[in-house]
Amino acid sequence: MQNALQIVYLIPLLPLIGFLINGLGRKHLSKSVIGVIGSGVVLASFAISIWVFLQVKGGNTHEVHYFDFISVGDLKIPFAFKIDQLSSLFLLIITGVGFLIHVYSTSYMHEEKTEHFGRYFAYLNLFIFSMLLLVMGANFVIMFIGWEGVGLCSYLLIGYWFKKTEYNKAANKAFIMNRIGDLAFLIAIFWLIQKLGTVTYSEVFIAANLAKLNATDISVITLLLFVGATGKSAQIPLYTWLPDAMAGPTPVSALIHAATMVTAGIYMIARSNLLYSLAPFTMDIIAYVGLATALFAATIALKQNDIKKVLAYSTVSQLGFMFLALGCGAYTAAVFHVMTHAFFKALMFLGSGSVIHAMGGEQDIRNMGGLSKNLKITFITFLIGCIAIAGIPPFSGFFSKDAILLSAFAKNPVLYGIALFTALLTAFYMFRLLFITFTGKFRGTHEQQHHLHESPAPMTIPLVILAVLSIIGGFVGIPEVFMHGGDKLGEFLSPVITNHSEGHVSHSTEYMLMGLSTVLVLGMIAFAWFKFKNYQRTEEKGFGKVLENKWYVDELYDKVIVNPLHKLGGFFNSIFESKVVDGIVNGVGRAVSYTSSKFRLLQSGQVANYILLMVGSMVLIFVLQFFLKR
């Protein structure tokens, strides 16, 4: 492993170099050079990540220490990377999917001015660097640096088209809501330092140190970390930033909100699985919040008409499934779904970009229809993504979704029932999206129909690769019920992740649950086909209107939180700031000015007056001394 360790720092360093070159040279480099540099550095990181993964697969794991990042008294926080099974798997996902999205972007963003094209790729490279830092860090502080980095990059990329006010508002919303979770994460880090004097994983997660934490410490720390994960991974109540984040370019949606950034919370909890397994109360909260998020977001997705908004709420829902698995102690199942979700959701986001590209920027699916005739590759790959997310065997989503549903059944059959219902909603709204967009008659303008065309190769090739991964990606986690020793992913992650599921399900029950979910999903797809194959635009009424307006959660937040804060800010600005703060400052100035103007009268320049004051002062002193002595 030593040879690999000599170059492991290059994995995050190369995208950082790409960021510097493209960022500083954006006014001087051509688009082709910018695209080659931006994509090439991520490809190089991917190649090194493969090498490191193979080393880890051979049993070679290591913690690479570079220097002491913080050294204060007994507290030492090193700048170190942890290369093990969990981090090496995430390295492949981040750099592999990230590279495909970079390649896709070279064509999708080609109409941008060269300067802005360079800025875009600089931001993408910086994001990859931050995400790699997050997963490679050997302690919570290095993770937090990457955590903040991806938050910054999400702000920059969501607000990439900064001349549009609503896009800036979406970027601000993402940044502010993430800060709420980040504060909780930071407090958890301070708590660990205060109790254990370290934040390094290899020291925190050993029995001797875990024994130093009482039940309250463990509950508080795990809850604070979960609040941090809630912000980054868009769970109730901090989920509303992610759908608004669709304001950024479509490849950004694929990179940040499907494959990498939003899975940071799952990575953090999976990394801390030994700590969470000691906190059953926190685990229950994670399971219930995850399931509630999955169901809530799925109901909203049923009535969304913006192609990217449907996928955004689908992402929130799928993240809810991952947290359900974490709460049930099935950490491997959650990581497995992170991987398969990265494939099929990135595929569908990029597919939606291909549709938007062909439609001249149109995102409302009610103005589409019949696109399968002109966008054959996009249609086929999008169909594969829909089948995968619906959980139809043997596509990747089937295996990871089944593992999550099984863990929910083992914990509580009621959780399983709600999770299965949510999975059926997933199949329905995804195929609703597919059928309204690609089947039936074209409902757009004549000019849009005239310009319909398949996307160029730099956009379709990543679609095909991701479609293949969406088909075969699940075979790394084939459950034992199908093949003895088939769960290669669980076996690979076992040195890092200890699953803590509460019950065991027999093979016969597992077969029955798989069969039930598959039959119901197929029935739901058939129902979607009959309902939307000849879609005609109609206005939503009643409950449908509530879902179309996202349960009015944003309006509720505005009324309960945002507007009162604005009014409070207005009060402080107009009353407290001007009357109290400025009044005190200005009052002090006026008092000094007034007092000095009066004291100036004492400096008359007349010696007789000075002698009179001196004699008067001496008399006053003698009098005071006389009375004080008495």
Image (cartoon, helix red, strand yellow):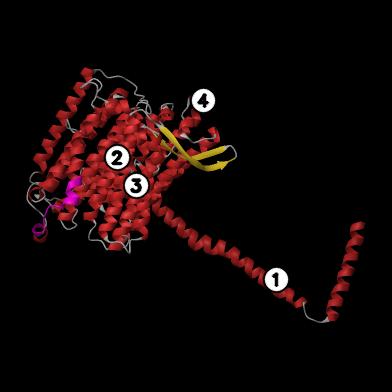
Task: Please tell me whether mark 3 sits on a helix, a strand or a loop.
Answer: helix
Amino acid under label 4? Answer: Ala
309 drawn magenta = no
Label 3 vs 2, first from the N-terminus: 2
Residue marked by disc 1: 595
Label 2 vs 1, first from the N-terminus: 2
Residue 507 image position (x, y, % from top left): 23, 18
- Nearer the observer, disc 1 or disc 3? 3
Query: How many neighbours does mark 3 have within 10 angstroms: few (below 14), some (14-19), or many (20 or more)?
Result: many
Which residue is located at x 17 percent, y 48 percent? 460
Label 2 vs 4, first from the N-terminus: 2
Q: Which mark is residue 208?
A: 4
Residue marked by disc 3: 128
Q: Is residue 467 visible?
A: yes
Q: CA distance from mark 2 to mark 4?
A: 34 Å
Q: CA distance from mark 4 to mark 1?
A: 67 Å
Start and end of the magenta stretch? 449-462
Amino acid under label 3? Answer: Ile
